[in-house]
Image (cartoon, rainbow, N blue to C red):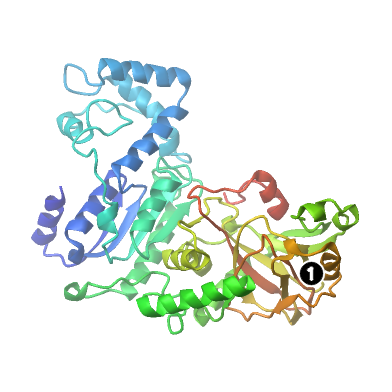
Amino acid sequence: MVEDVEFIRQGLCLGQLDILGHSFGGILAQSYAVAYSANVKSLLLVATASSIRSVNADLQRVKESAAPATRLRLEALEALGIYGPDGAQRPEYRQLADEALMPYIYINKTPTPSFPTYDLGWDVMRDLWGGDSEFEASGDVRGLDLVPELRTLTIPAIVIYGDHDIVRDATARETNAALKGSTLVRLAHCAHEVYVDQPEKFLEAVEEFLSLSREKTVPLESHTTNKSNSMDIINTDLYDLGDAVARARHIEAARSQLAKTGSAAIPDFVRATALASMVEEAKAEFGHAHRREMELGFNAKDELMLADPLLLARKSPYRMSSLGSDLLAESGALKRLYRSQDLIEFIREIVGVATLYSTTDPLINATVTYMGDGDQQGWHFDDNDFVVSLLLQSPDSGGNFEYVANATTLPQSEINEILDGQSELTRRLVPQPGTLLLFRGRKALHRVAPVSGSRLRIIALLSYDTSPDFVYAEQVRLNALGRTGSTVA
């Protein structure tokens, strides 16, 4: 089939191609890109996978989620043989398979399943996919794994899938991670047929990607370097992450700063135009942010702290507004930076973890926090190992980030001095807009000091995890955003 695509390209006298492949077509698109990378301008992969291993895992999840009676009957028919004497799949099996698959195919515009009466070329299907089960590939494609070859490509790429897709988050991330610099877009409220469930959002993502890709088109004869879609956002004049020597220098500097002080500030990390776009989007959505005003404890960690009732009784004010990730555009500069593999790998190497992924939580991945006059975030310890933030806008005054590293080892008297604002150990950071900040907050007592003036302090919080399928508990969502579900229809 790969050679058929190339035969058509040559027959139509086409140059480099923007190739879009959906589902199995996505596997074909990847296979073509591996074989004829010089002929591919960009790669658009929709609701697809890069290994049959992942495909089988995706389909096994679908099968297991079917009604028990349906699953048992499917397995009984599979034991009998899913193909009849006429060479076609048995109608009962096809119908039951469709019933199991349908919730993952459409969620907004579900057509009535109907078994086709025309010849589907079942012999080809059987050879290609296998004849044992609709939910496990055992034919010619078994063992297919394109991931190693994808890692060698330098082609602009986007991976699009739905939040109710057959394709799991882990499967989409496998492809995204293999394609250096690729963009990952997870469309809300749609299943496998993403362009049917959410046609406008799908087209928006495709058009945005193609627009960026065309700006960075590489001539056919010199298609040897990768231009990541995040490079129009990251300030490559200062942080050229594509230069191995410069990248290593930046990583080592940040890693050293993080080890010595517990924080690493990387100023002017994003371009001025990208920063302006992020601020514009954040301001436009401010009216939808969740307002929080409360008094909270400092999330004591040490046993001695936990044993002191007077210390535990101390509260600090929390006054701020928070915007959920679902209210930010996937095609916007902030979300694109957040999902950028360039940034993820940069952070991963700085913090020194083996794996790092953007979270799959639809509400808390890239969020925005606003603080106005009198707002502040009280003293506290974090529950997570590190936090990544990007300051978008400074207030008129105040809003400094203050912290004491390794505070869990301090005596209770010193903790009280920190909470009183009297400790000489307190460090104060005054980052400028565009500063990327990495901070280890599990052992550091920290706060955002009160803000003054009419100008909002706006900061983006970028949540990552070492697990590819991490989502926050519903109580965390409720505390942060006042809701547990998406507000986007």
Identify which residue is drawn at 29% across, 17% down. 79
**Would residue 181 be visible to someone looking at this image?**
yes
In the shown orientation, is residue 178 left or right of residue 128? right
In this view, the residue in front, 165 or 404, is 404
Identify which residue is drawn at 84% across, 62% down. 412
Is 140 above or below relative to 402? above
> Residue 123 lies in what quarter of the image?
top left
Identify which residue is drawn at 45% across, 47% down. 169
Specify few, some or many for label 1: CA neighbours under 10 Å numbering under 14, 14-19, or 20 or more: many
> Residue 7 lies in what quarter of the image?
bottom left
Is 414 above or below relative to 384? below
Residue 322: image x %, image y %?
69, 61
**Would residue 280 be visible to someone looking at this image?**
no
Residue type (three-letter) at the residue carrying disc 1: Asp
In the shown orientation, is residue 68 left or right of residue 245? right
Residue 459: image x %, image y %?
64, 70
Residue 125: image x %, image y %?
20, 33
In the shown orientation, is residue 429 left or right of residue 40? right
Q: Secondary structure at mark 1?
A: loop
Residue 411: image x %, image y %?
81, 64
> Residue 12 lies in what quarter of the image?
bottom left
Is 109 above or below relative to 70? below
- Residue designated by label 1: 375
In this view, the residue in front, 364 or 348, is 348
Identify which residue is drawn at 32% across, 57% down. 44
Furthest residue in direction bottom, as rendered? 237
